[in-house]
Every structure is written in C-alpha cells, then in structure tokens.
Image: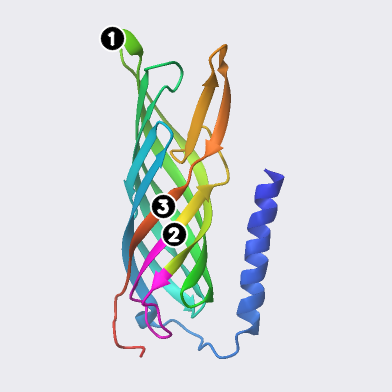
Amino acid sequence: MKKLVTLYLVFLFFSTALMAQDDEEQRGFKKENLFAGGSITVSFFNSQTLLGANPFFGYKIANWLDAGVALNYVYSGTRDYYQYNDKVRQTVLGPGAFARLYPVSFLFAQCQFEHNFSKFKYVPPGGSPVETTTGDANSLLVGGGFAQGREKGSNTFYYICLLFDVMKNPESPYVNVTSNPSNPLEKRVDMIPIIRAGINVSLFSGRNK
C-alpha cells in the first residue's frame, strides 16, 4: 500500500509541476474543452475472460492533461477458480474518475480510480448448488496508451490503452486469483492486462480551433 500511495503522489506532483510551467494555457472555464466518449474492455488471461464498457465525461484542463468521471460495467468469467472444472461468473458496475497525461500529442499515461459493486456467482463442479454473493472493491488502473487523430485544439480522437490494477484487491474484476490445491484458503493474486479501445468526442466541435 505504501508503494501505491507513493506512485499516486508522484503522479500528482508531476502533473502540478507541469501545470505551473505552462504559461500559454488560457485560464477560466471553456465549454469547448468538454468531451464525452467511451471504450470497450477486452481481456483474455489463462482461464479468465473479461468484457466491459466504460462511458465517460470529461474536461481538457490543458493541452497535455485531461480529467473526468466514468461509469464502469464489466463481466468476467473464470474456470478452475477454487478447484478443477468449477466456474465463476462476475458482473460489475461502478463509478470512477480518471486523469490522462500527454507527454506528446499521441501518447498518454492514464490513472483511473474505480469503486465497483459486484455480483459473484460460483458454480461448483458436478452439479452442486450455485452460490451467489455480492460485494464491492476499489481498483486503481495505471498504464498508458496511444491516441490517433488528437491535435492541439481538438478533443475528438480514437485511442487504445493498456492498464493494470495495481491495488490487486482479490475482489477486483481486473485480477486473476489462483488457489493452492492443497490449501484452498491460500490464494495468489495476479494483475491481468486490461485493453481498452474507444473514442473521445468534443461536445462543442470547432469552437476552439
């Protein structure tokens, strides 16, 4: 957890330092900096499948910094979770907030915090009764991506990014949990790569060009 906090503070420090050095940015709210969009999430890792959607609404703070809020939906399915040939089905819905830092116009680093509510369904092998539970978990997705068509003064472009949940909460939809066959209570939590591809659309196109 200390490493996680340190990583987040470093991200904030560099964002603040760059903001202080940017003398060319105009201050004040500008509606042409508002944008919306969304992405799809696809990941396949060992015996796990993950599919989702992530609509968002945001504001371009500077030419190198975007921030906004998002809604997250994820469906994940896993086989051999506790024992051989069992199945897990998980549905996730929750809010989030993100920041994207652009060192150059076509590359960005992203940090996104999410608090997700989940419904967990466990299907034991051999026709045993299905077990259903609910819960919630925090996730901090960190990574980077590529933007195509992003230019100065424009908020409309396509992008693809690769993210990892550095919190590694066992209840997160973005991790793979493996149990020790000799001791099912002993688990290993691995981050899985999250690929998101989507579009970022200016809500007032052409006003700021």
According to the image, label 2 marks what residue?
A: 161
Quadrant in which residue 127 is drawn = top left
Q: Residues within 10 Å of mark 1 (few under 14, many from 20)?
A: few
Find residue 198 and report its horizontal and vertical position in percent.
33, 62
Place residue 135 in its image quadrant.
Answer: top left
Q: Are marks 2 and 3 in contact (CB under 8 Å)?
A: yes
Magenta stretch containing residue 184, yes or no? no
Tell me, yes or no, if residue 55 can be seen here: no
Tell me residue 94's x, y (percent): 38, 46
The residue sitting at 52% across, 32% down in the picture is: 170
Question: In the rendered structure, which amino acid carries the disc numbered 1?
Answer: Gly
Q: Which mark is residue 127?
A: 1
Pick the front one: 75 or 136 = 75
Question: Disc 1 or 3, which lies upstream in sequence?
Answer: 1
Q: How far apart, in angstroms, are the residues tagged by discs 2 and 1?
A: 40 Å
Figure check: 35 above or below 98: below
Residue bearing mark 3: 195
Q: Is residue 10 above or below residue 128?
A: below
Q: Is residue 64 left or right of residue 7?
A: left
Q: The C terminus lies in which quarter of the figure?
A: bottom left
- How far across and how far down the image is residue 159, in percent? 38, 66
Name the kind of residue labelled 3 in the image. Ile
